[in-house]
Amino acid sequence: LIVRYMLPTQGVIRFSEYSALYDIIVKKNNKWRRLNDMTDYSFVYDELKDKYCQDNGRMAEDPVRMFKYLMIKSILGVSDADLVEHCMTDMALKFFLGLVPEDNVIDSSTLTKFRRQRLKEVSLLDKLICKSVEIARSKGIDISRKIIVDSTHTLSRSKPAIPAGVLQKQARILRKAVYEADNSQKGKLPEKYEGTDLEKTMDYMCGLLSYLKEQKISFYPAISEKMNLLSEMMDDITDHYTISADPDARIGHKSADSEFFGYKGHLAVTPERLVVAATMTSGEKNDGKELPELIRKAKVSIPDLEEVIGDGAYSAQENLENAEKESVEIVAKLNPVVANGRRENDQFSFNKDAGMMVCPAGHMAVKKIHSKVTEKNKNERFLYYFDILKCRKCRHANLCGYKKGQNSKTYTVTMRSELQEKQLAKQNTDEFKEKYGLRYIIEAKNSELKHSYHLDKAISYGLDAYTLQGAVALFTSNLVRINRILDEKAK
């Protein structure tokens, strides 16, 4: 009884003299009525009840209703404040939320707190996808034993700053604090560097920090805090070369000369256009490396999975080997430079959009040279050159083999793989071409998620927030798709 008092459930029937308005205004074929009637949303309560205090505090907002607010936000693509205003005046939305016509709606800050506090550390992505597939089957929809895989990029709310400029700005703040604490330090601090060369900027920062660590004023809180912040910024730059308000966003590449800053959603979609598996990562992650996890997740809903259809990013040697173990056929065209003849424990990856190799730190090669077969070199090769200025300050040198003092960093790919030769022979058959023709389905799904469910831009900062945004968008899109399939069957 105490739990139900502190955490109300939406199952409680409420009456109002105005409820008859819903029968007049919200017709049976209304999108929101159909979404409401499609399933019992109490599974949300079961997942979140442990996030609420059971015997203390005021009456909480119904978690099922709060989750429905997020579904509405995913479809409308508006701010929390505008969402609340829409829900206050739109009768269909009030019906979907389980409110009577005269009820008030939440304050926009309540929804923000719900996302950040109640949903923190809650793994909804896989649970919501599996729930939507379960709903589809309960409605008599057959799920194919094949999936189409691809990734879609989502922009971060913030943009990356120029590393040298950010460091120099923080250094000026630090120097000012030092002068205020000890005016005699003027003329003693290392000479400023305000150019654009990152290597010289980093050397200047190291010299400044080294000098201050030997001074007594470094123990002053006003000085030590700013020193620690500058040191942390330098670590971020050596780790992933960017500084931003979004800590988890990274630079990814759509092509050789086009990049984005944000995240990636890796999806597995059936020919019925239902998402059955997904992983959410930062923008620099390689598509192909997510395939084993997508297969594992897809097999939860489709235990007898037979085929995986994808582009050249998924035809790497390790993926073909994993597919054999999983008894799954990979329908993906070989790219002439996709991970053939790779070294053992190699962490370089191939970006199929840009046609370039990417190092373990996420930096893309700046130049590629194609070496054809000759009498001396019996195998076709590709030689990739990386930006040596980035390599000199990168903390992942132990993963790529860069040694201090090198004037260049290259990576060579040799074309040889018996397993991929078999794949090459297979991809020339008519059967393969027919199966591969289904790839357009996931391209359409990616476009739908970006434009209809506003997954083109992150609504908050951090990978956890993006994962939650993606989870709600995928669940909502699956429910809408189920309704469309049912309509097609009815016709």
Image (tube, helix red, strand yellow):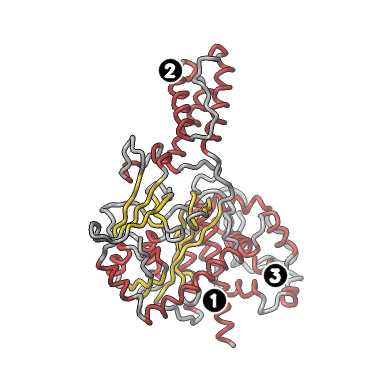
Dot 2 surroundings within 10 Å: few (below 14), some, or many (20 or more)?
few
**Res. 36 in view:** yes
Cα gap from disc 1 to disc 2, whole angstroms:
67 Å
- Helix, strand or loop for disc 2: loop
Residue 290 place in picture, x, y as percent: 39, 60
Residue 60 position within the rendered picture, expressed as x and y whole percent measured from the top left: 60, 54
For the C terminus, which image quadrant? bottom right
Residue occupied by mark 1: 482
**What amino acid is labelled 3 in the image?**
Ala
Which dot marks residue 92? 3
Question: Which amino acid does the dot numbered 1 rest on?
Answer: Ile
Q: Residue furthest bottom?
A: 491
Could you tell me which residue is drawn at 57 percent across and 68 percent down? Answer: 448
Pointer 2 residue: 214
In the picture shown, does residue 132 fall above or below 343?
A: below
Residue 18 in the image: state x and y as whole percent. Answer: 76, 70
